[in-house]
Amino acid sequence: MIAAVDAPETEPARAFGADVLHLDTGKTIDELAGAIARIVARDLRRRGVVVGMSGGIDSSVVAALCARALGPERVLGLLMPEQETTDDSVHLAGLVAGRLGIPTEVVNIGPALAALGCYRARDEAIRWVFPEYGEGWRCKIVLPPLTGEQRFNVFRLVVQAPDGTTRQAPLPLDAYLQVVAASNMKQRTRKLTEYYHAERRNFAVAGTPNRLEYDQGFFVKYGDGAADLKPIAHLYKTQVYALAEALEIPEEVRQRPPTTETYSLPQTQEEFYFALPYHQMDLCLWAHNHGVPAAEAAPVVGLAPAQVQLVYRDIEAKRRTTRFLHMTPILIASVPEIAVTSAGHADSTGK
Amino acid sequence: MAQPGTNGHNGTNGHASANSLEEVIRALLVENFLVAIGGADLADDDSLIEQGIIDSTGVLELVMLLEETFDIRVQDADVLPENLDSVNNLVAYVQRKLQVAR
């Protein structure tokens, strides 16, 4: 098997502990590299892979695995900063690519986004809530933290004035929709750029979601959600970190907290989308997938049983509401001659 | 605060009595969330979130509809499942807000 995470119905009952996410990293790396090579050569019939590299852990691991699978010369790392990208991001991505020996290109998508009206549309929506928002201000959207009580996943807008003071407000519907739709242009523009560079080399495009992101719909439809292959979508983020260490991804990258690199204020994934830090989310997700009762999971995760129960409900709620992001175009009547092989997975033994 | 153009939502005039209030709220849900909620399909205490009738975007829509329909102000602190997540909860919440408004 590719990883130590099996489908619930095939795995015998086991005590739930922190070690459930443990991986044999050496073996996993070999299996993943083998699978990538077979997928690119046989299923996709392409000559290499383009990886959008953000300087984050997921894209770094995907790039490293592709380099291992195909040889560094058959991987292209694309660095795509825009107006609100941190300098860190380009620096770290370049560092990783350098260590891996893969070629890179830096494409500043800021001018394209400005021409598309991305920043203007987003800022206009913010001004419906904070009319004073303008030049020199920064923003992000956040979810309220997980408390013991039930809450709705309703975003709040946080803005920071040039003098550093911040203020918060709930987002009314239209402002929310426009802020998200405008911000989503960033991911879609990056994917557009990846496909240009891939197609001109006859390469495939890799996606970099980890299991938590994939499962919970934390991606933009036809943005970072688009790809020809997604080598780590079945791996819990904790496992991705373990692979990163085994792949000798630079420590700076491994230590950096997961960010979204979408808004001008630093925004952790936790405050934006997930209720908890990723390690706790991973354990809750694993436990939920394996039918572990909340009371049994709670001490391992370090939460009260009622909170774990809320996380389980939240996991299901997010799956329900983001099913739309995974859907391929819906036909009204089937075209049976074209069977849409919507991914599934390649058998790692190459059958 | 400048508002964008119409969202094409339907509202109705508010009513104060519980029975008609429930009818108004059910009509709001049916008309705006594109789900056929017949009398038998949605129980008064069914969770709208769990029935898949609203998601987090839907919560924002619901808040807007309540404010427009009943001319009330939904406070940020009121945006909780216990106020909004079922027909019963909505009826009780709107009644409370309308009584306070008098």
Image (cartoon, rainbow, N blue to C red):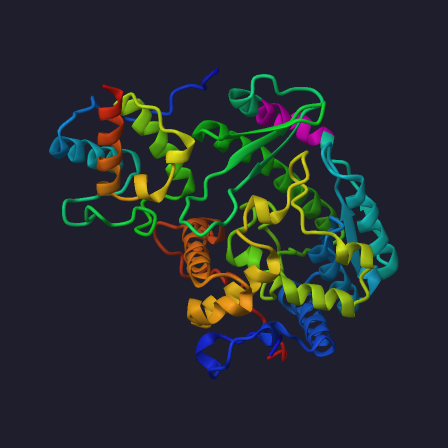
Q: Nearer the viewer, residue A115 or A244?
A: A244
| Residue A327 placement (x, y as % from top left) | 46, 52
Residue at figure coordinates x 22%, y 34% from the top left: B25
Locate residue A83: give its quadrant.
Answer: top right
Inspect the magenta stretch and tell me whether residue A121 lies in it. yes
Q: Main secondary structure of the magenta part?
A: helix
- Nearest to the observer: residue A1 or residue A349: A1
The answer to whether residue A331 is left or right of residue A261 is left
User: Looking at the image, which residue is at 48% across and 49% down?
Assistant: A147
Image coordinates of residue A116 in percent, x first then y, are: 63, 28
Magenta stretch containing residue A187, yes or no?
Answer: no
Q: Is residue A37 above or below residue B12?
A: below
Residue at 63% over, 62% down? A237
Question: Is residue A203 at all visible to an observer of this figure?
Answer: no
Near-viewer residue (A113 or A253): A253
The residue sitting at the bottom extreme is: A12
Q: Is residue B99 above or below residue A70?
A: above
Q: Quadrant of residue A74?
A: bottom right
On the question of residue A281 being in view, the answer is yes
Q: Is residue B41 left or right of residue A267?
A: left
Position of the C terminus of chain B by quadrant: top left
In the figure, A96 relative to A70: above or below? above
Q: Where does residue A314 sit, x and y in percent of width and height?
A: 44, 54
User: What stretch of residues is rendered in magenta?
Assistant: A111-123
Q: Residue at 33% across / 52% down in the picture?
A: B50
Q: How many marks?
A: 0
